[in-house]
Image: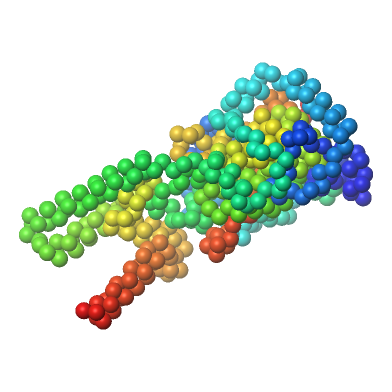
Amino acid sequence: MEQSDKLIPRFKSDGENTGSSPGMGPGQEQVSLQTARLKQKQQQKRQQSRFPGPVQSLVDLLGPEQPKGQIVSPGQPKLTPQEYKEIVERHKPKPTLLKNSVWAFGVGGIICAIGQVIQNLLHALGINGTAMASASSVVMIFLGALLTGLGVYDEIGKRAGAGSIVPITGFANSMVAPALEFKREGFVLGVGARLFTIAGPVLVYGILTSVIIGLIKLLVG
Amino acid sequence: MNSKLRGKQTLAFQTPPVIVSMASIVGPMEGQGPLGSKFDKVLPDNLDGEQSWEKTESKMLKDAAKLAISQAKLTEQDIGFMLAGDLLNQITASNYAARDLPIPFLGLFGACSTMALGMAVGSMLIDGGYAARVVAAASSHHETAERQYRYPTELGVQRPMSAQWTVTGAGASLLAQDGYGVKITHATLGKVIDLGITDPSDMGSAMAPAIADTIITHFQDLGLGPEEYDLVITGDLGTVGMNICHELVQRAGYDLTRFADCGVLIYDPSQDAHAGGSGCGCSAVVMNGHIMKEILAGRLRKALFIGSGALLSPTFSQQGESIPSVGHAVALEGPG
């Protein structure tokens, strides 16, 4: 330690412009002479630019987006999680809200329209009332499951978000996806145990809510 | 006594170990990416004839290690130790790959920083005189990672723009005491840093402070600046993490002008990988398939590679914990 510190001078470039890095302790004792000398050296190196031709083109090829950072208030002390959060917020891409909403609206609407077409067909076949509602749900669940098995539903969901999660086809997807996924771990400990990993919470709280509402109805009505 | 230690965290190798051969195997999506032609082998699909994705990942890792050994015209008997890691629980892909190889094995877990960690520890073994040759490898697989860390692969979920795509790939480096190849001159082992990011679909932001810290420490320990390197390349910060890291390093007074990230390089924006690639395999294949070859060809003379690992646990994450991260750096130098 003692030896190595003597061998290699510690430095920080841009004396005024220093701010401690995140998670770094103090220990920034500097020898101004060494700093100055190193800065000079660096400047020389910068001017020389070791590989003017090929590397430039390589770097162009390497980074499709060379980041352009901005210097934030210099001389800052240790970065706090709160400060860091602000930095992150500045760099985080904003979710494409409008595009996502349009997709969700469109796809959700199409799924519901398909459901309606099925209901109308069932009606034309003479199936009515609750039988019609149940039968159309069964068909939609089948379609959701089929598209999951064919590897299409996740592609739809990637774009549509809630538009394909909320309809009953989304529920089918949340059951079939784990069933496919965990088949390799066996039918008991794989499929059996993991089938409800996604749909489980919906069922638990859905049933719980209906029980509570039933109790309220019993007491009030 | 600490004659090989520089500053706080940087190891200077007396006889820099040489990377005498490299291997990289990737999945089909990576094969279609901008670096597709650079890799040694592209799998036809993410299963490659195996019974499960986990088995595919393990086979990929084993094949990468074997390929690195055979390309150096050596046999498994010539290798002192194998150091490998992956993202699966109990680093299973590596353990099962090592089961089929007659090489003493050290399992490593540094999340996505495993390749850099393997190179650093391997270099220590060689420079310390404990081995003449060491193979360091790392792997990840998109589907195995998805099902362990996130959701079943066929579930229709929407990924935020900050999310990254786990690379299907395995890379291996064969480190030797002497020979021709890229030299590992220094290694800076990082501290685990956590600035409170809890979003598992924003690993770049979680990792950036740890990576920035390792980069800054490396420069301070050695009294260098970014000018020393033709390229500073991080493992898998992605576009978001890369921008944050750049800013954090700049706050400390260093301007990274020649700065790249394996996760950003591996996919084309049209491949819908959002912020870029991630996973142990990401930096393993980009370094072994691309960057090392650039150094060998003389297009880069010196490069600083910083493996970036988000030490995420789904269990801890669900219990409300934030994501700790670590960055390990290795300084690479051309043979000339």
Looking at the image, residue B203 sits to the left or right of residue A173; the answer is right
Q: Residue at x 51, y 50 (%)?
A: B201
Instruction: Quarter of the image for the C terminus of chain B: give it.
Output: top right
Using the rendered view, name the quadrant where residue B73 is placed.
Answer: top right
Q: Position of residue A193 (x, y in %)?
A: 43, 68
Q: Position of residue B292 (x, y in %)?
A: 68, 33
Q: Nearer the viewer, residue B73 or B112?
A: B112
Q: Residue at x 6, y 59 (%)?
A: A126
Q: Is residue A135 above or below residue B210?
A: below
Q: Nearer the viewer, residue B89 or B245?
A: B245
Looking at the image, residue B319 sits to the left or right of residue B287; the answer is left
Query: Would residue B312 be seen by someone viewing this image from the given angle?
Result: no
Q: Is residue A125 above or below residue B263?
A: below
Residue reaching furthest bottom?
Answer: A219
Q: Residue at x 45, y 56 (%)?
A: B151
Count all numbered tags in the image, as a single digit. 0
Query: Would residue A218 be seen by someone viewing this image from the given angle?
Result: yes
Q: Is residue B334 above or below residue B64?
A: above
Q: Nearer the viewer, residue A89 or B270?
A: A89
Q: Position of residue B276 (x, y in %)?
A: 53, 40
Q: Nearer the viewer, residue A58 or B17?
A: A58
Q: Residue at x 67, y 48 (%)?
A: A79
Q: Position of residue A56 (x, y in %)?
A: 64, 22
